[in-house]
Image (cartoon, rainbow, N blue to C red):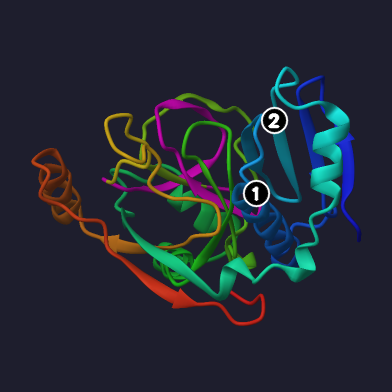
Amino acid sequence: MNPEFHMSGDKAFIVRFGYDIDIKTHRKVKNFTRAIEQLHIRGVSQIVPAYCDVTVCYDPAIIDYETLLSKLKAIDINTINDFNSASKLIHIPVCYHEEFAPDLSFVARHNELDVEEVINLHSSVEYLVYMLGFTPGFVYLGGLDKKITTPRKYKPRQKIKAGAVGIADKQTGVYPIDSPGGWQIIGKTPLKMFDISRTPEVLIQSGDHIKFDPISPVEYHDIKEAIRNKQYFVKSETIMINNGQS
């Protein structure tokens, strides 16, 4: 579909590229975001990509509505070199031991699997990061195996610790900070997904891919200590993306 342009208050546009959460729409969102960034439009204060749309925030004292709308409508994403010929794959170590996985056995029972099958299915996928939101650095991922989809908890927890890895319906993700939440917690990573003292503060960006690597409790605590001593380096690599397929 052609992009739809909608005002969002008096200081933002929402540019929508569809209503389906899929790789094709994601690529349009990312290409459009990159195109705006490359234009360096004076007055544009923030660009926020989501599943199917891009929010463009601006200062009306610097650029007016009509001028900005004209510039945005002039962007032809079909002429942009595809952003996604290559992507960063970031490895996230996760301990699935019961100490860190209070809901893992429930996820297994719900899907009529054993715990090891859930771990293998969850850790065998290279997940695409569609967007960030909810809290700083919270990743919304695509690619969860249908065999382990599990509904959210009926009663959310008041506090989930940073690093908790969870499943909610067809999604999986990592809690970057302590927060309330209703996801089924199946593991924990020692990595800091959000760290205000780090540049950039957020470990993962939209368009990246991540893979969860199972680790033991001993490895979890070793990595935690190495991070504390600034002696741990997050493992990442470049992967090639083929015609919109992750």
Element on which disc 1 rests: helix
* Residue range (magenta): 167-190
Residue 57 — which label? Answer: 2
Element on which disc 2 rests: strand
Q: Position of residue 179 (x, y in %)?
A: 46, 25
Q: Position of residue 74 (x, y in %)?
A: 84, 53
Which one is in front, 164 or 236?
A: 236
Q: Amino acid at mark 1?
A: Leu
Q: Is residue 89 above or below residue 110?
A: below
Q: Callout 1 environment at 10 Å: few (<14), some (14 to 19), or many (20+)?
A: few
Q: Quadrant of residue 177?
A: top left
Q: Quadrant of residue 130?
A: bottom right
Q: Position of residue 235 (x, y in %)?
A: 27, 63
Q: Quadrant of residue 93?
A: bottom left
Q: Position of residue 178 (x, y in %)?
A: 40, 27
Residue 39 — which label? Answer: 1
Q: Callout 2 environment at 10 Å: few (<14), some (14 to 19), or many (20+)?
A: some
Q: Residue at x 67, y 60 (%)?
A: 31
Q: Is residue 152 above or below residue 106?
A: above
Q: Residue at x 47, y 64 (%)?
A: 122
In the image, taking residue 30 as reference, residue 225 lies left or right, namely left
Q: Amino acid at mark 2?
A: Cys
